[in-house]
Image (spheres, rainbow, N blue to C red):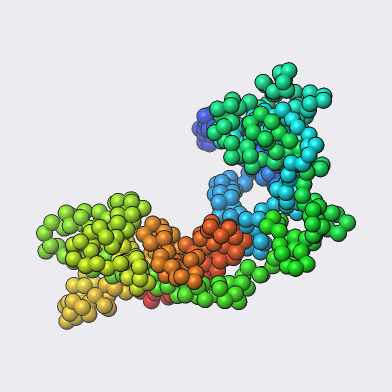
């Protein structure tokens, strides 16, 4: 009995040995993990320089978790979920959270940095050359490209011949080669600009101020610099900025992030602070904002609904017309109908803008009219809806064609046998089945058109604008209005624009949630 267990029959019953692991896959994993570690080390140095300890801790924790996950044979599902989760956090969750956090601040032009940076900017902006100002030999250099890199002043002390590199953060001693006249010919870590290269960036050189204890160093031409005296200085005892000439002072207001005088005058340079819900309440309570906002919101809904509904109806009618086998040349017709979808939308929008031109546009010339399409609110809105109809119906035509082909022909045949007409069969059978398949696409199309920046900005740029409000036009959507607030000529208001973006997000999210709930009900009825 024992011999039989040890015999050939028992050996044949043993399971086969597992295949050897793929060495190429192992090397590929090692290379990817090596690249991940190298990127993490590269990203750690800027975080350490900026003392961003929270970000550094997140980086170390994420890298350690990835190395543990992929260097151990366990947690197989997590190995597949980890890359998608990281990308979701990096490109979706983090931007949304950052936008939401910005909405609760006054971040924008004049409020970009800290209070200390605002004080430096105020003092350096008030620097003037006074009798006895110390003069320096100046050499302009850069740490990057000679045409676009950040500028640096290489300052030679006339007494000690010590060379210092100066930028917006102050002076730093450097090792350099200096001529007898004090000109720097070479400096470690810097590229010295020639006279021609420096002259091309003369405006940047004039604007650069290097802060010092008593004021700032500014250029006087391309080869000389002076240390001027600040006309306005910060006094820590009163937490205010004083004018050394007039004695006027501006006290710090932490709620506004500004220096404010007793008569209400504010210095232009401020700092970033948390303002709570003021950006949100401003949308609803400020008469200059709430009225245009509500009008824009109503038009935004109308634009999204008309664009989505119009393109759907037209695309569905074309799909039904070409669904019949009795139509000859259906393939050719379908190719011609999707041509607008195959062309770049931004180019077509610019073409349509020229076609609506009052003086030389094709539409006025073709019909012999003299309509100022973009001069009136009604005509401009009709024009952008017409453009959207032309650009959007091919997409609806394609998806409706596919959905019609997926509906079994036996259903319509059975309805005809039961005596139902063509319209009754379409209304009772075809359309409900189409809506089950197409409603999610209609919801996504509505969300896209609700934020269709290109359709407005490339055709009308929001025009026409009322005389009393050049920031909000008749064809503006909330997204173009937000863009104008964030990057308009009156100064960027990123915090306020982020608050409006949150409003847009909530509106689209609520509409989408309600629509998807109705879609699930349709699926339950017709499943």
Q: Position of residue 394 (x, y in %)?
A: 28, 59
Residue 119 visible in image: yes
Depicted 489 relative to depicted 510: above or below: above
Q: Quadrant of residue 156?
A: top right
Q: Nearer the viewer, residue 173 or 45?
A: 173
Q: Residue furthest top?
A: 180
Residue 177 image point, x, y percent: 71, 19
Image quadrant in which the C terminus is located: bottom left
Residue occupying the far bottom of the picture: 419
Vertical side of 382 occupied by 119: above or below: above
- Of the pair 322 and 192, the residue shown nearer to us: 192
Residue in the picture at 53% in, 57% down: 489
The quadrant of the image that shows the N terminus is: top right
Residue 516, percent across and down?
A: 45, 70
Relative vertical location of residue 424 with respect to residue 139 in this rendering, above or below: below
* In the displayed structure image, the side of residue 407 where residue 64 appears, left or right: right
């Amino acid at each position: 009995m024992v011999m039989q267990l040890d015999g050939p029959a028992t050996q044949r019953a043993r399971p086969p040995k597992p295949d050897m692991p793929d060495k190429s896959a192992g090397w590929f994993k090692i290379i990817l993990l090596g690249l991940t570690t190298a990127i993490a080390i590269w990203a750690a140095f800027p975080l350490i320089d900026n003392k961003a300890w929270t970000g550094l801790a997140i980086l170390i924790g994420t890298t350690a978790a990835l190395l543990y996950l992929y260097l151990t044979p366990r947690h197989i599902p997590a190995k597949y979920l980890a890359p998608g989760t990281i990308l979701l956090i990096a490109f979706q969750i983090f931007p949304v959270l950052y936008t939401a956090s910005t909405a609760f601040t006054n971040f924008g032009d004049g409020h970009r940095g800290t209070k200390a940076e605002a004080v430096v900017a105020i003092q350096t902006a008030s620097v003037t050359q006074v009798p006895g100002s110390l003069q320096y030999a100046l050499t302009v250099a850069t740490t990057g490209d000679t045409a676009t890199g950040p500028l640096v002043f290489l300052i030679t002390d006339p007494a000690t011949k010590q060379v210092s590199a100066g930028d917006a953060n102050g002076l730093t001693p450097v090792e350099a080669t200096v001529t007898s006249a004090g000109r720097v010919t070479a400096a470690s870590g810097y590229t010295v600009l020639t006279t021609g290269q420096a002259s091309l960036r003369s405006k940047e050189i004039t604007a650069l101020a290097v802060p010092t204890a008593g004021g700032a160093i500014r250029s006087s031409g391309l080869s000389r610099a002076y240390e001027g005296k600040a006309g306005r200085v910060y006094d820590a005892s009163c937490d205010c900025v004083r004018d050394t000439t007039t004695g006027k002072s501006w006290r710090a207001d932490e709620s506004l992030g500004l220096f404010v005088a007793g008569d209400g005058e504010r210095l232009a340079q401020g700092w970033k602070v948390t303002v709570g819900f003021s950006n949100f309440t401003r949308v609803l309570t400020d008469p200059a904002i709430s009225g245009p906002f509500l009008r824009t919101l109503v038009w935004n809904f109308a634009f999204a609904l008309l664009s989505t509904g119009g393109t759907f109806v037209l695309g569905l009618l074309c799909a039904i017309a070409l669904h019949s086998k009795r139509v000859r040349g259906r393939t050719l017709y379908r190719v011609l109908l999707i041509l607008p979808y195959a062309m770049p939308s931004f180019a077509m929008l610019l073409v349509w803008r020229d076609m609506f031109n009052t003086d030389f546009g094709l539409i006025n010339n073709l019909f012999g009219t003299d309509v100022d399409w973009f001069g009136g609110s009604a005509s401009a809105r009709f024009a952008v809806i017409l453009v959207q109809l032309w650009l959007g119906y091919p997409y609806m035509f394609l998806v409706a064609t596919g959905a019609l082909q997926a509906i079994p022909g036996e259903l319509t045949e059975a309805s005809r046998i039961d005596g139902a007409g063509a319209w009754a069969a379409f209304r009772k059978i075809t359309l409900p089945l189409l809506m089950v398949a197409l409603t999610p696409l209609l919801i996504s199309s509505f969300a896209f058109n609700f934020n269709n920046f290109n359709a407005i900005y490339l055709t009308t740029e929001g025009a026409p604008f009322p005389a009393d409000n050049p920031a909000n036009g008749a064809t503006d959507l909330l997204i173009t209005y937000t863009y104008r607030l964030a990057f308009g000529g009156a100064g960027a208001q990123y915090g306020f624009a982020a608050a409006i973006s949150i409003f847009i997000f909530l509106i689209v999210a609520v509409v989408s949630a309600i629509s998807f709930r109705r879609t699930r009900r349709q699926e339950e009825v017709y499943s």
